[in-house]
Amino acid sequence: MKLVLFSDLHLDAQFGWATREAARKRRRSLREALSAMMQLTLETKADAVLCGGDLYEHDRFSPDTAEFVRSTFEHVHPLPIYVAPGNHDWYGAKSLYHRTDWSPNVHVFAEDVLRPVELADGLTLWGAAHRAPANTDNFLEGFRVDRGGINLGLFHGSERRGFAWQGDGKVPHAAFYAEQIQSAGLDHALLGHYHSPNDAEHFTYPGNPAPLTFGEIGERGAVVVEVSESGSVTRYRHRVTSQQTFDLKVDVTGCTNSQELRERAAALVQGLSGIARLTLEGELGAEVDFRPEDLADVAPHMEAVIVRVGAISVGYDFDIIAKESTVRGQFVRDVVDADLPEEERRRVLVTGLRALDDRNDLEVI
């Protein structure tokens, strides 16, 4: 049995970190990824498609999105498609799932307990749905398969141990422990929720097929899962989008003018495509006249460049300035003598000196 698994596409995602045009392009790329995954099922001659939830954003989906998903799934009819709604696309009366007139090949699990469907003789898929955006219980708690053969699980949930090291900030939903998969009588669990891919012994997280934010790592995409007669699985990952995000750090240390800083940034993004986030770090020369928006056009070949100020300091020599018989010198002496925490003192000094120089070009962190 050959299955194509994906999850966490998040159609209609807001992309609040992007410009309006870049966000629109990103949302289009998510649709293109779904179309590519349906094409993958045809090319690999898969027996079924499985979605582990968060197919779309419940609070943002439009009638156009509903029709797009419906027609895309209908296009591969009669290939079966099974969807286990997650916490972002939870099943309810106002959900896309409930409102849409699906083609006969689409099966959406609608209960918050695992229910069986037969994929083939001796092969059962157990699926469940989130019925609310939060507080969904562990689907495996108190559950036990009631039949022999091969039994697979399909649901949106948080394996408690396997992702503790990632620190990705994901909130647990329908949290469970990996050992509960076997205890429940399942041979393997096909899952959604975590955006980082993971091919564990008894479960698979495909990860989100297309990047949603910066810092996402791992070979994401759709997973072709081959299930043997013994219940073991073999997994092959396939990229389904050319869209990429890059999280890059620009060391500004030693830059003596704004053009030099632009050249450093341009060198980092040379040859890249997609969206880059540039974080400025290091010590910037006090004479540099620079605004973060000056880098927005540093890579016209890319969709967008997002610039943010990280741990930047400005290279003032406070000891030398304090010796000046000037307003600047008196200001530094007064601040140094003030009872302030060290970090606050530095911030006041830099902000004040730049104001005295009539400079408002750089946010002080």
Image (cartoon, rainbow, N blue to C red):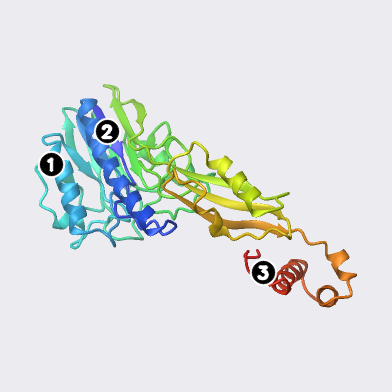
Viewer-nearest of discs 1 and 2: 1
- Image coordinates of residue 267 in percent, x first then y, are 58, 40
Look at mark 3 in the image and give the residue it sits on: 359
Q: CA distance from mark 3 to mark 2?
A: 57 Å
Q: Residues within 10 Å of mark 3 (few under 14, many from 20)?
A: few
> As displayed, is residue 228 above or below residue 295?
above
Q: State which quarter of the image contains the N terminus.
A: top left
Q: CA distance from mark 3 to mark 1?
A: 60 Å
* Amino acid residing under circle 1: Glu
Q: Secondary structure at mark 1?
A: helix
Q: Is tag 3's residue or tag 2's residue first in the polypeptide sequence? A: 2
Q: Is tag 3's residue or tag 1's residue first in the polypeptide sequence? A: 1
- Image coordinates of residue 179 in percent, x first then y, are 42, 39
Viewer-nearest of discs 3 and 1: 3
* Amino acid residing under circle 3: Arg
Q: Are marks 3 and 2 in contact (CB under 8 Å)?
A: no
Residue sitting at x 10%, y 52%? 101
Q: Residues within 10 Å of mark 2 (few under 14, many from 20)?
A: many
- Image coordinates of residue 297 in percent, x first then y, are 49, 51
> As displayed, is residue 358 above or below residue 284?
below
Q: Residues within 10 Å of mark 1 (few under 14, many from 20)?
A: some
Q: CA distance from mark 1 to mark 2?
A: 16 Å
Look at mark 2 in the image and give the residue it sits on: 4
* Amino acid residing under circle 2: Val
